[in-house]
Image (cartoon, grey):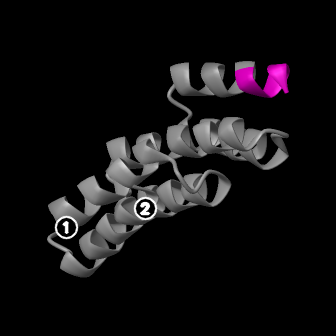
Amino acid sequence: REILSILARIAGARGETELAIQFLTDLGRTATDKVEAAGYARRVAAIHEERGNRADARQAWLDALDFLPSDREAMAGLKRLAESDGDPKALIAVLQREASLA
């Protein structure tokens, strides 16, 4: 696991984003802790969002919520995408999810 994490950082530093995403995804899938797995999914989401891959970012934020349903950072990411896309249905879904955790 440590080696995969190092490889992900190296790939990211070298600009090999797709490879870094694959390593991070593998780390998330094999994580034994849901908080850790959600963290990897959030990193993948942030990379996708930064690159403008909105659909992939949205899916990665949802993956983070699958691992950790109360993940506020993932909900903020989904809300940010919904607002910038002008998607009221997606925004309402995120707000409802947030309200259910309050």
| Side of 38 relative to 7 (left or right) | left
Measure how far apart labels 1 and 2 are at the Cα level.
Answer: 11 Å
- The disc at residue 46 is none
Q: Is residue 83 above or below residue 86?
A: above
Q: Which residue is mark 2?
A: 58
Q: Which residue is mark 1?
A: 85
Please, what is the three-letter code of the amino acid marked with disc 1? Asp
- Residue 4 versus residue 58: which sits nearer the camera? 58
**Along the viewing direction, whichever of 44 and 80 lies nearer the viewer:** 80
Decide which of tag 1 and tag 2 comes sooner along the chain. Answer: 2
Q: Which residue is drawn at the image coordinates 33% and 49% (left, top)?
A: 76
Which element carries disc 1, helix, strand or loop? helix
Task: Find the magenta span and give its range.
Answer: 1-5
Q: Main secondary structure of the magenta part?
A: helix
The residue most toward the bottom is: 89
Q: Amino acid at mark 2?
A: Arg
Structural crowding at the residue carrying mark 2, measured as other residues with C-alpha within 10 Å and reported as few (<14), some (14–19) or many (≥20) = many
In which quadrant of the rendered image does the C terminus lie? bottom left
Q: Is residue 33 left or right of residue 35?
A: right
Give residue 73's position: percent from left, percent from top: 42, 42
Element assignment for label 2: helix
Tell me which residue sits at (50%, 47%) in the image: 71
Instruction: Determine whether, in the image, residue 28 is placed left or right of residue 97.
Output: right
Q: Position of residue 19 (x, y in %)?
A: 65, 39
x 78%, y 39%: residue:
33
Does residue 49 sit above or below 69 in this rendering?
above
**Residue 2 included in the magenta stretch of the image:** yes
Q: Residue at x 26, y 81 (%)?
A: 89
